Image (tube, rainbow, N blue to C red):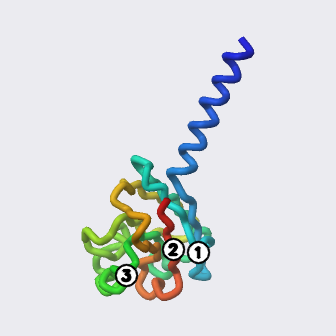
Amino acid sequence: MRVLLISLISIFSSTIFADNHCSADISAADNMMFDKKEITVDSTCSSFTVNFNHKGKMPIQAGGHNVVIIESKNFNSIVSKIDMKLGADAGFLPDMPEVIAKTAIIGGGSVTKVSFDPSSMSKDSKYSFFCSFPGHYAIMKGNVKVM
Ligand code: ZN
């Protein structure tokens, strides 16, 4: 009975461990700063989830935020496509293959998440995350490390 209990606990712990490796939590507030400068993506995960929490109070149209993951070399071409007319749900970005993952733009007090397949990400390339609300990308950005 005792052995069974120990093995059940170890199965439970390894499940939690796997989940931690396949997700990252990021938050931001009205100060236009992410709480993290770097997140780590485990490219062996079949699906990786970014959980994003806007802890501020600003409404979407005035100070919404999101998280977009891209290969760093595509940063300038992607931010040049930011257009308010595309809508907050699309992150003010058109659908383009260069965007690896993006959440919707959310207002203060909201949470959102996005899951994506990280298998195409390579340890030899540089990746970034940023907020695609118009103007925010200049300071709301960080590194995505691939392991
Ligand atoms: Zn933002």
Picture quadrant where residue 30 is located: bottom right
Q: Are marks 2 and 1 in contact (CB under 8 Å)?
A: yes
Please give the residue where the numbered disc 3 appears in the rendered image: 75
- How far, Cα to Cα, is label 2 from label 3? 12 Å
Q: Which residue corresponds to the image point at 42% horizontal and 58% vertical from the top-left?
A: 114
Where is 60 relative to 6, above or below? below
Q: Are marks 2 and 3 in contact (CB under 8 Å)?
A: no
46 displayed left or right of 55: left
Disc 3, SS: helix
Please give the residue where the numbered disc 1 appears in the rendered image: 37
The numbered dot on residue 137 is none
Residue 71 appears at what percent x and percent y? 37, 73
Please give the residue where the numbered disc 2 appears in the rendered image: 143
- How far, Cα to Cα, is label 1 from label 3? 16 Å
Residue 82 appears at what percent x and percent y? 33, 82
69 displayed left or right of 90: right
Picture quadrant where residue 29 is located: bottom right
Q: Which residue corresponds to the image point at 43% horizontal and 72% vertical from the top-left?
A: 127
Of labels 1 and 3, earlier in sequence is 1
113 displayed left or right of 94: right
